[in-house]
């Protein structure tokens, strides 16, 4: 039996720099892994997760089979890369560091595979590691998710509107899900800072530790095998 952490991804800044001919959006983002993590437990046996689950797809991509239990702590649909982190944990378990394999599973998987702190460009497949910085962040995740596809569609419909808070997707996400504003304002009232949306949402975050109800304080971290 082997245990591997799947660290959440926090998108510290995000600019949308263009749209490819195939409709995929090009990004220039800074991302960091934080110690909010799922745990994957690998043991002898067969995978019993659905075929379209990212863990199943990752196992198939590396030609491996195992019984995998996923102990979830990263909220689903929160913009924290939980599914991608789980897929990256499978690749690390299998000894696969191939970014092309990672990219075939999803745009966030290459970063989750490398982890730490990095500049991420292209559609997510170009990952340039940056010096590690020890930081604390407070996360507030509403009890609902936001569709990434819907947010990018709204960004297009808004004419490629740039955000004024370090994340170009914020205005589009608020247009798709106006309830986000209430949760942004809750965190702002506690922290005295302007929260930023994590990726396409739904999580808001500020730098610093502001523990309390519904809030998660997390710190930057490195995946297994990174110094």
Image (cartoon, rainbow, N blue to C red):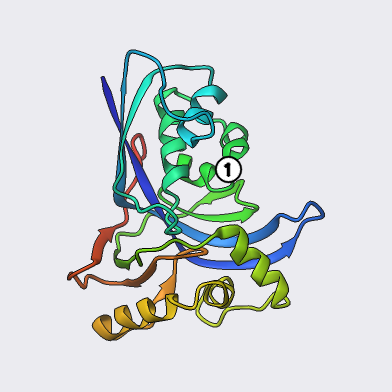
Residue sitting at x 33%, y 36%: 224
Tell me which residue sits at (55%, 62%) in the image.
Answer: 29
Q: Residue furthest right?
A: 21
Q: On the image, which quarter does residue 155 sit in?
A: bottom right
Q: Locate residue 157, reporting x and y percent.
A: 72, 74
Is residue 97 something that shows in the picture?
A: no
User: Is residue 189 in view from this perspective?
Assistant: yes
Indicate whether 154 appears above or below 97: below
Please, which residue is most extreme toward the top here? Answer: 45
- Location of residue 18 (image quadrant): bottom right
- Residue 184 vs 76, above or below: the answer is below
Residue 99 x %, y % = 58, 36
Q: Report the residue at 44% width, 76% height from top.
A: 179
Q: Name the residue rendered at 52%, 76% in the picture.
A: 174
* Rendered-image quadrant of the C terminus: top left
Give the residue pinned by disc 1.
106
Give whichever of 164, 171 is nearer the camera.
Answer: 171
């Amino acid at each position: 039996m082997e245990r591997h952490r799947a660290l959440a991804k926090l998108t510290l800044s995000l600019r949308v720099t263009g749209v490819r001919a195939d409709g995929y959006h090009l990004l220039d983002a800074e991302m960091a892994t934080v110690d909010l993590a799922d745990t994957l437990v690998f043991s002898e046996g067969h995978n019993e997760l659905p075929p379209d689950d990212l863990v199943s797809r990752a196992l198939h991509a590396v030609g491996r089979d195992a019984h995998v239990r996923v102990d979830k702590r990263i909220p689903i649909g929160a913009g924290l890369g939980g599914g991608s982190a789980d897929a990256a944990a499978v690749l690390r378990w299998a000894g696969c560091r191939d970014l092309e394999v990672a990219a075939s599973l999803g745009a966030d998987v290459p970063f989750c595979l490398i982890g730490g702190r990095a500049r991420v460009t292209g559609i997510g497949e170009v990952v340039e590691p940056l010096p590690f910085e020890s930081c604390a962040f407070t996360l507030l995740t509403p009890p609902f998710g936001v569709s990434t596809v819907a947010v990018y569609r709204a960004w297009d419909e808004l004419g490629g509107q740039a955000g004024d808070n370090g994340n170009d997707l914020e205005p589009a996400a608020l247009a798709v899900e106006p309830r986000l504003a209430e949760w942004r304002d809750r965190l702002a009232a506690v922290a005295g800072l302007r929260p930023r949306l994590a990726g396409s949402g739904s999580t808001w975050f500020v730098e610093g530790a502001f523990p309390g109800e519904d809030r998660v304080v997390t710190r930057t971290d490195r995946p297994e095998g990174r110094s």
